[in-house]
Image (cartoon, helix red, strand yellow):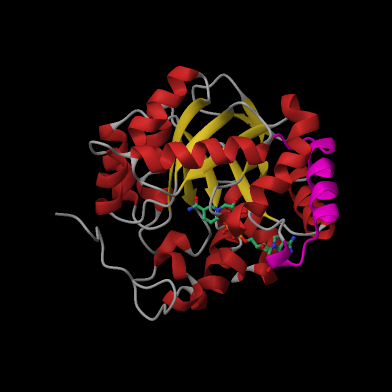
């Protein structure tokens, strides 16, 4: 599999990485299956594993932890804080470390910064970023990261406030058409040496009839790596096969892909860009929450 440098960290990862949200009962994945999938991913060369404190009440982290316990040195672990406060985030980090059965994480992310108010909360006085800097000084966290689906300008502003090592961003082909993080944020991130991780590549399920073109499209972007959430060996195998034989879409193929998926560019197919995730009938206004 092609590997790419991960920002300024000195590490490189294969283009396909592991989205750890789905290895849970909620997605019909048993604990035994979860352990088998994660072990198989490592055996096949995947090194980057994304998870979060909030996923399935801790089951996602706990299951990853069953493998981390035995194979820590082969894994880059990224987890996240949902809590925007310094003290709350610290408690979440301590819980994450316990569940993951490790004494440090490679990357700790400010999770899902959907508007400027949330960015202010994370980065302001008494915010989670203070906990992150302290945890990095203590060696509990190696790199500080941020994630965003909604508006590239939030991340542009975030990088002005703090030198985040990496950013996890939504980069599906559908995202190309609405407040595109790939168009408006990737060039700046790359110029600054900020690592970038692509997500929402299968549009949270909206593009599962287009697995091959969706993955080839995302791998063809100038991102450091791409996480895809999987809950079965079959999904992992299919995604690995596409990554291992990856060639970028040609210009003509990319245009044809856009033409085929453009009818899906609707709030209800892209709830992460909608004004209301639970009732996605209209787009979120640009720069929501900006004062
Ligand atoms: N803000 C954040 O930081 C944030 C938010 C959400 C997720 N994430 C991370 O991103 C990862 C990726 O999730 P995502 O939300 O971006 O979703 P996604 O990757 O766009 O879609 C993942 C879903 O696609 C389906 N899938 C995967 N491989 C497949 C295949 N080969 N064939 C058919 N279907 C396939 C699975 O759906 P089914 O399970 O329905 O089969 C899987 O759950 C998550 O695991 C998580 O680690 C981060």
Q: Quadrant of residue 11?
A: top right
Q: Position of residue 191 (x, y in %)?
A: 38, 29
Q: Is residue 236 above or below residue 90?
A: below
Tell which of 284 and 134 is nearer to you: 134
Q: Say which residue appears at 78% left-offset and 35% top-offset.
A: 45
Q: Quadrant of residue 202?
A: bottom right
Q: Position of residue 8 (x, y in %)?
A: 49, 22
Magenta span: chief secondary structure: helix
Residue 36 forms part of the magenta stretch: yes
Q: Is residue 291 above or below residue 247?
A: below
Query: What is the span of residues highlighted in magenta in the rendered image?
Result: 25-47
Q: Say which residue appears at 67% left-offset and 43% top-offset.
A: 17
Q: Say which residue appears at 55% left-offset and 29% top-offset.
A: 6
Q: Is residue 263 visible?
A: yes
View quadrant of ligand 1: bottom right
Tell which of 61 and 235 is nearer to you: 61
Q: Is residue 196 above or below residue 72?
A: below
């Amino acid at each position: 599999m092609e590997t790419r440098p991960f920002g300024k960290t000195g590490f490189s990862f294969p283009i396909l990485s592991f989205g750890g949200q789905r290895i849970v009962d909620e997605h019909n994945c048993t604990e035994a299956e979860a352990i088998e999938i994660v072990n198989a991913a490592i055996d096949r060369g995947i090194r980057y594993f994304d998870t979060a404190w909030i996923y399935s009440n801790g089951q996602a982290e706990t299951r990853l932890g069953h493998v981390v316990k035995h194979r820590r040195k082969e894994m880059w672990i990224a987890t996240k804080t949902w809590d925007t406060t310094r003290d709350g985030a610290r408690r979440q980090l301590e819980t994450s470390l316990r569940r993951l059965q490790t004494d440090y994480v490679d990357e700790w992310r400010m999770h899902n910064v959907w508007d400027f108010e949330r960015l202010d909360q994370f980065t302001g006085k008494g915010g989670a970023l203070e906990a992150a800097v302290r945890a990095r000084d203590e060696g509990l966290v190696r790199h500080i990261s941020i994630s965003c689906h909604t508006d590239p300008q939030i991340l542009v502003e975030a990088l002005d406030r703090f030198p985040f090592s990496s950013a996890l961003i939504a980069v599906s082909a559908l995202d190309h058409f609405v407040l595109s993080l790939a168009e408006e944020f990737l060039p700046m991130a790359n110029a600054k040496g900020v690592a970038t991780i692509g997500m929402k590549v299968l549009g949270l399920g909206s593009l599962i009839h287009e697995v091959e073109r969706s993955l080839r499209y995302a791998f063809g972007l100038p991102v450091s790596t791409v996480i895809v959430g999987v809950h079965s060996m079959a999904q992992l195998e299919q995604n690995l096969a596409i990554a291992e034989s990856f060639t970028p879409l040609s210009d003509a193929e990319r245009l044809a892909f856009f033409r085929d998926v453009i009818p899906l560019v609707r709030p209800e197919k892209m709830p992460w860009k909608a004004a209301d995730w639970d009732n996605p009938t209209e787009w979120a206004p640009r720069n929501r929450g900006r004062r």
